[in-house]
Amino acid sequence: MIKYLLLLLFTGITAQSQILQEKDRAKVVDEILADRFENLLPGLMDRAGIDMWVLISREYNEDPVMRTMLPATWLNARRRTIMVFYRDAAKDTLERLAVARYNIGDNITSAWDPESQPDQWKALVDVISKRDPKKIGLNYSLHFNIEDGIVKTDHEEFLKVLPENYRSRVVSAEDLAVSWIETRTKKEMELYEELVAITHAIIAEAFSEKVITPGQTTSEDVVWWMRQKVTDMGLETWFHPSVDIQRDDEELKDHIEAFSGGYGNTIIQPGDLLHCDFGITYLRLNTDCQQHAYVLKEGEKEVPQFLKNALSKGNRLQDILTGNFKTGNTGNQILLASLAEAKSEGLRPSIYTHPLGSYGHSSGPTIGMWDSQGGVPGPGDYKLFPNTVYAIELNTTVEIPEWNKDIRIMLEEAGFWGENGFRYVNGRQTEIIPIPGK
């Protein structure tokens, strides 16, 4: 089903690509979810050493992990929704149960009869007692926000009704929840390439004469064009885009100022080096991309060589970082090795790469933050596992004698780490996009 829909609707990707209708989106989402429950979750529970995973949420206050498990027709949890996953590794079975009034789609079966047991909490205890798990995982975590989903009230109510002999078996499901959020299936990766291609196509259109008229168009105009384009295509974005400008007669701004909209209504002129940060949300996956464009001056036919050379240094930093990916290494180990190698080659690097997938700033090993280049305690200590996706986000400062100043090459592309190593999900920018001048 997925391959058919993709071939039908995504052949020849452009920013005008037809997006799936809601009914077809639901089919894809539910097909992927069923595959994840059936073929992915059992192994993740075995790896984490948790044989029962309990997720508890109330409507409009959903655990971020539970949100990724709801079927396409459930836009929110209903009343108090309780999911229980019980793994019997010896029998190679996985029960997917709901202590709720309804089945949760086709994947999770209701195990509560309110007529015979009106108390939902006691019904949950009955489910637990009948299976006698060794470890009961709950979603609480000190370092991972997405995995800290059980609220204080539900946590207290659960422990209050749980029999004393089970309380010592309650553990944090942090590792299990992280692995569920970060691990991508083959079916999802079929989609991901198309999502990134759409993202690239929107950026290419934004950085074109169709959108930008030098001397008239502002950076803010381009930002809002991107937002509107996403809406018109029936997509969403998980953060407000940014477009910033570097030019030969202005001091280099801090890159955080650039990301926070510091360029506003600055009019784009010939000779400007543009940079954008942009991503979309579609089919429960997210993209995150940064690319550069250059506005040609009068008489210029192509991007100046000194800017091409600067971009190549950014590409080299990407290669150094991804060359240090190794299953089992932590985000901090990858960060420090990459920074040391880049500096030994004369680069001036900053690396702030993050997991990407079910959320934009997702769960998994954090590989630096812009203000934590010595390592990130907690998320940076998490290990790299295969079948995971990252926003390869970084920058390098480059001296430009032609402008008598430094510039900053800021790049971000979706990359996949698998059993066969690293690859970009849909390529990366290796050439600055030229925009015709006046």
Image: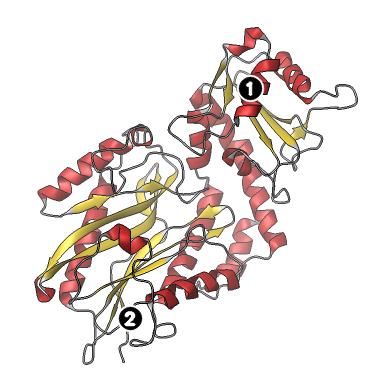
Residue 284 is situated, as x and y percent measured from the top left of the image, at 58, 52
Residue 190 visible in the current orientation: no
Residue 251 is situated, as x and y percent measured from the top left of the image, at 19, 69
Quadrant of res 431: bottom left
Left or right placement of residue 176 versus residue 106 in this view: left
The secondary element bearing badge 2 is classed as loop
Colour mapping: secondary structure
The amino acid type, in three-letter code, at marker 1 is Glu
User: Which quarter of the rendering shows the N terminus?
Assistant: bottom right
Q: Residue beneath label 1, please?
A: 156
Q: Nearer the viewer, residue 182 or 172?
A: 172
Quadrant of res 88: top right
Q: Residue at x 15, y 73 (%)?
A: 306
**Count of numbered badges drawn on the protein:** 2
Left or right placement of residue 367 versus residue 358 in this view: left
Left or right placement of residue 436 versus residue 201 in this view: left
The secondary element bearing badge 1 is classed as helix
Q: Nearer the viewer, residue 6 or 233?
A: 233
Q: Residue beneath label 2, please?
A: 268
Q: Residue at x 64, y 18 (%)?
A: 159
Other residues around mark 1 within 10 Å, as few (<14) / some (14–19) / many (≥20): few
**CA distance separating discs 2 and 1:** 56 Å
Residue 382 is situated, as x and y percent measured from the top left of the image, at 37, 33
